[in-house]
Amino acid sequence: AAPRSAEVQQGTWLAEGALWCIWTHVGDATAFTKAKVMVVDVVELTNVLRGSGAEELCKQYGRSYHSIIVNSPPERPPRDLPSDATDCTEVLCGMNHDCQLLVSRAAFSQLSRSRRAALFMVTKGFDKLEQEINTGKCLALQNGVGEVQRLVVVVVLKVWNKSNCVLTQIGTWDPDEQKCIADVKLPGTKKAQDEMPAEAVQRVLKSDLALLADRIELVSEETEVKWQDSAAYGINTKYLRKVNTAQLVAEPPTFARASYRQATRSERRSNSIAGALQRVNRRAHSLGGVLAETVGGTWRTGSAGGKTEDFDHSDLDLQDVDGWQPRLQEVFLMARGKKMGLYAWLPADVLTHLQQPENVAKLTSWTDRIKCTDGELTQTM
């Protein structure tokens, strides 16, 4: 590979890895103008930190940094210069919760003294932000110029099937509101307290995607970074989106016919759709079970007596979205705690298309007609 060069800006680390592991330089530094470099002696730094209040914090930082280095993929080997993988926010994500709290609370304290504090006190966003920090749902830190930033780590699964379609959540059934809410996104979750991103992926597989978990094989992970001002908190937020590409290596459960049962009186009182569905069609071997699927060009749903009704779904599959015809090969529900996720396999271009703001209303008009009552899925025409 051809040598790469990069201009080093003021305040940039050179070979930070030498602080945290046995390091071999992989490049040369050349000064084209007069410059000053501060050299950090690793042994002396260790002696200064030993026994101090910052010792445990630095140990955790070093362990996290070292883990990133030794687990670097071959296509992105460690470098002397900083990279996205060794960005301080990435390193912070690998530290334990106590150390994350220490860093976040220092930034939170700085924020409380800023001009924005008055706005937070009025909107109660300040208390909510503190709660998110304490529960590990987000982190706060100060950047190099002292600005407080919020950090949220999200993991998503991009599961492909043999038809080159992506498993997509297209809506959520809310039993309290008795409504299906359009929401096009990949399966995923926020990283929880003391949880590594890989552990969060496994949590999604074991809970939201339990029906397919034993048929999914993880392939690779990429990190997407998005900066956005938080509407809730009014501070600049960095979203680290860990996209885990996976492959469906075996066919999902298929159902020639789907049978359903009425929920019990106690289940109806608690609006527990998931409880009713766990007993539906034992062949599913799932937490939720398939409620509806595309069978031979028709949309098949079940009824309490085990009967099925076939509907022509030509006007239900969003064909009017600028001429696109999403191939809704399967439409099914899987338990997501109290709520249920409505999923489908979509071609990647259709997924992107349906996420456009101008198409959300069209999808909403489709999901608005879906109802789930006592374990039975129906859709009005």
Image: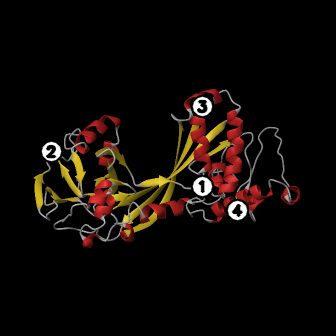
Is any atom of residue 86 visible in this view?
A: no
- Residue 78: numbered disc: none
Residue at coordinates 63% horizontally, 58% vertically from top-left?
A: 94
Whether the residues at callouts 1 and 4 have beta carbons within 8 Å, the answer is: no
Q: Which residue is mark 3?
A: 120
Gap between marks 1 and 4 measured at Cα: 32 Å
Q: Which amino acid is tagged 4? A: Arg
Foreground disc of the pair 3, 2: 3
Q: Which residue is mark 1?
A: 2
Foreground disc of the pair 4, 3: 3
Pointer 1 or 2: first along the chain = 1
Foreground disc of the pair 1, 4: 4
Rendering quarter of residue 341: bottom left
Q: Which residue is mark 2?
A: 315
Gap between marks 4 and 2 measured at Cα: 56 Å
Pointer 1 or 4: first along the chain = 1
Q: Which amino acid is tagged 1? A: Ala
Gap between marks 1 and 2 measured at Cα: 55 Å
- Which of 56/105 is in front? 105
Foreground disc of the pair 3, 1: 3
